[in-house]
Amino acid sequence: MAKMGKPLSSVLAIIVFLYSLFFFVALSSAANVTYDRRSLIIDGQRKLLISASIHYPRSVPGMWPGLVKTAKEGGVDVIESYVFWNGHEPSPDNYYFDGRYDLVKFVKIVKDAGMYMMLRIGPFVAAEWNFGGVPVWLHYVPGTVFRTNNEPFKYHMQKFMTVVVNLMKQEKLFASQGGPIILAQVENEYGYLETLYGEKAKQYAMWAAQMALSQNIGIPWIMCNQDDAPDPVINTCNSFYCDTFTPNSPNKPKLWTENWPGWFKTFGARDPHRPPEDIAFSVARFFQKGGSLQNYYMYHGGTNFGRTSGGPFVTTSYDYDAPIDEYGLARLPKWSHLKELHKSIKLCEKTLLSSEPTIVSLGPLQEADVYADTLGNCVAFIANIDDKNDKMVEFQNVSYYLPAWSVSILPDCKHVVFNTAKVGSQTSVIQMVPESLQPSFVLSSKPLEWEVFVEKSGIWGEIDFTRVCFVDHINTTKDTTDYLWYTSSFYVDESEDILKKGGPPVLKVESKGHALHAFVNGKLEASAFGSKFKLQAPISLKHGKNEIALLSMTVGMQSGGPSYDWVGAGLTSVQISFGNGTKDLSAYDWSYKIGLEGEHLGIHNPDGSNNVKWVPTSDPPKEQPLTWYKAVVDAPPGEDPIGLDMIHMGKGFAWLNGEHIGRYWPIRSSTNEVCVQQCDYRGTFFYDKCMTGCGEPTQRWYHIPRSWFKPTGNVLIIFEEKGGDPTMIRFSRRKTSGACAMVSEDHPSFDPERSLHGIHYNKRGPAVQLTCPTNTKISEVRFASYGNPTGSCGSYTLGNCHDPNSFSTVKTACLNKDECSIELNEENFNTHLCSGTVKKLAVEAICS
């Protein structure tokens, strides 16, 4: 044994050394995140940060790596997400962190990409998410009042936040532990509510901040739109513009937690858009005026799968006109224009964050903010905030052309490398290519066989309860379903002649929302919807007993606002008007049934599909309400993202292999509202400035992630409330079919390159650059003109100045290539053409 002492001690010494080394490496990998008035400071280095909102439950785990990768390629440093309480704690103390709610997996994907993370724990999120992310069950905990100095609410809020924080600590995901999370948020946009809730609101906000700090996570906490956020919590800005925002302390940095690059959609409304020029303008102005972190809300909006959308009436799509679209494809030119912006701003990082600006007036609405450091480096942002007129300005004895509502970035105070109004990036042409539903396990020539199950209108099974009044819909269902049946009956005596006089009887219903289908004697007579609405429709009655069954529906719960959890839904009055009077049914006995029979039996799930007797048919009934449809289909070919085309259906839900696609409702927007063909980016943006889609369905296609498909044997289940034509349901592949671009001679013409010896500015002519998707090439050039072409992608036209060699030049450079570049120079074009005008090159090509 004595002889083994020396080797053993050597082994122990090695173990101790390796342990110490491991501890040192682990400790050294931890990041020290602090801040001062200028920026976040990570391990002693000031950081200028571009952040992107990607909500993990609004996509699927199979998409997460690609979304993060595309964001990083777009020049993003930080991924931001809320934490969705109601998804993680669906019932008290029942926690769920799997599937789309696998928060740890999502954060680790961000870490593996070498990026930072901003975790907005909240846990109230708003976010057009059901009930603002707070579990509905909490509303029914006795004595609970949301988001104020209320003990039950604070108890459950702190408990959940502690669960999340401990989970992150356990996985060592805070930067102080070597993880990617550099910022955490408590509460959300609460400041404007404080005056409405009174003194208890102030107490609650201060409690929330102190509770968050007590979690000891080793990184800064933030509170957005909270002007009284106490030190050391940082208050931040949410808006379309935040250049004029000032933190509530001179010791805090200027952070922008929500820059809205688009807007969400609501059923029955138009389609909102925000031009890339204006987004870039807002970002450049923010950094010009001392900002150091900016987050796009949303960078990828994703999909409100299942019943997660709030609002109410927010669509299943949460695309948000974001730089990455709902299906995971980069939206061009928005994504690429912002990528070039990020690259240009990053060139300025060190000088911007190590000096104070000198503001130089260049005109009544023109100015330069100049940053110069002790090493002699100089950065300038030159802005023209005139929303109508382009300007030529003199800066440091050089003339610069500034389009209206734009910012030029000069990383060396000399060379313009980017102007926010000059979009040189290509526009991708996106199509939804229809695919017929192909039946599985049979020859494709055989027609698709549907199976059908029809619900009974009104009470199915046993009555849940009866009241001589109307109950609140939400308090009754507690958001376990969209549906609540209100049923009653009344008699029309055969001796009465009221059915013969004064025209048909009229049903009049008043409701607090959200939607209603009215059945009389088993027949669907009318539908209506709204936050508060009145239904008025003629109906058919008979002598004797008449059954009335009113299907009340919610379309997503409230997601915010003062006392939002007390906003109700459901019927408040029911009357029937005859020619000689009115029958008020409001005080009649009303019987209630929560949900649908198919829901109760779980027939949309693989395990419950056989709980009813489906009727097989190759000719399913059309325009039939309350009908479940089932078909077994193959996956669409290829790898393109998939949307379910529901344009010929009414309203309802869809599932694939038990996965809940969400609500569908291809309701059309009004033709009486204003829509634009092309948005003028100039001037202050507001959410309904640039609307399209008047008279079109608010949402026609419903995203189905590729990971939900099997090669064959996919079970598609549809529940249709009103009636539609299921034979017209299609899968559609989201496909990039072409590319367009227009570049002018006055686009920035310097291509900066960073090296060990600093930044070099390579002079080049502006160029049109086109890129096709993987495995495709430019198969056709549809339009090419160097001169003064006009229009936009898909509608370019020749101007009165056109180089006839345009087509041949572009074809030579691009045809049968996956990408090409055509510079605006004398070698390619007659640059002396139409002298005195700024020449442009417009190109439209097909990718296949």
Image (cartoon, grey):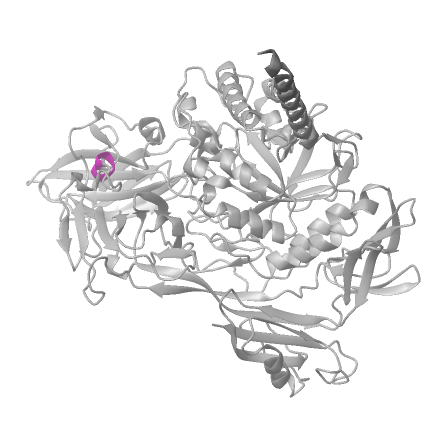
Residue furthest toward the bottom? 804
Quarter holding the N terminus is top right
Q: Position of residue 32 (x, y in %)?
A: 72, 30
Between 599 and 569, the residue placed more toward the observer is 599
Q: In the rendered view, tell whether residue 502 sits above or below residue 557.
A: below
Q: Relative to residue 615, is residue 173 drawn left or right? A: right
Between 536 and 798, the residue placed more toward the observer is 798
Between 156 and 623, the residue placed more toward the observer is 156
Between 340 and 273, the residue placed more toward the observer is 340
Q: Relative to residue 709, is residue 340 drawn left or right? A: right
Q: Relative to residue 806, is residue 513 drawn left or right? A: left
Q: Position of residue 286 (x, y in %)?
A: 73, 46
Q: Position of residue 365 (x, y in %)?
A: 81, 55
| Displayed quadrant of residue 798 | bottom right
Q: Residue at x 29, y 29 (%)?
A: 470
- Residue 496 visible (yes or no): yes
Q: In the rendered view, tell whether residue 815 sits above or below residue 455.
A: below
| Displayed quadrant of residue 373 | top right
Magenta segment boundaries in residue numbering = 597-601
- Residue 409 visible (yes or no): no
Q: Position of residue 794 (x, y in %)?
A: 53, 72
